[in-house]
Image (cartoon, rainbow, N blue to C red):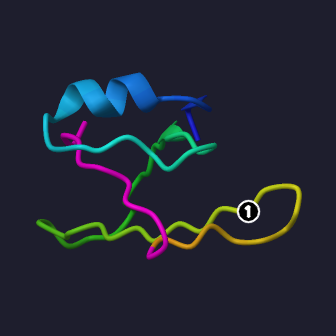
Amino acid sequence: MVAADPDGTEEVLAENMFNEPPAEGRVFFLATLEATYHGRSRGVQLVVHLECARSSNVAYDEFAAECGSSRNR
């Protein structure tokens, strides 16, 4: 992880007019990640699946909340 914004709600809402605000008491957490591919093949698509947990040790449920859409950076 290169950087984190624990409340990126304003940025997500400004990114796309169809993004809806998070549910009451929730925020959009933004993380900037960096990855390096060391393989030999070219044109490989990187697919990343992340799971996050808070101090409660309960994983975030990606199907319970929408995360909005943003552009790839």
**Left or right relative to 71: residue 61:** right
User: Which sits in the foreground, 18 or 72?
Assistant: 18
Give yes or no for residue 65 being in the magenta stretch: yes
Is disc 1 surrounded by few (<14), some (14 to 19) or many (20+) residues within 10 Å?
few
Query: Residue 23 in the image: x percent, y percent?
Result: 50, 50
Query: Residue 17 in the image: x percent, y percent?
Result: 13, 34
What residue is disc 1 on? 53
**Left or right relative to 61: residue 70:** left
User: Which sits in the foreground, 68 or 44?
Assistant: 68
Picture residue at 25% right of the left edge, 36% below the top: 73
SS class of the residue under badge 1? loop
Picture residue at 48% right of the left edge, 43% below the top: 33
Picture residue at 16% right of the left edge, 35% below the top: 16
Q: Quadrant of residue 42?
A: bottom left
Q: How many marks?
A: 1
Q: Which range is magenta?
A: 63-73
Query: Residue 53 in the image: x percent, y percent?
Result: 73, 62
Residue at the extreme front of the image, as rendered: 24
Q: Is residue 9 above or below residue 47?
A: above
**Left or right relative to 43: residue 69:** right
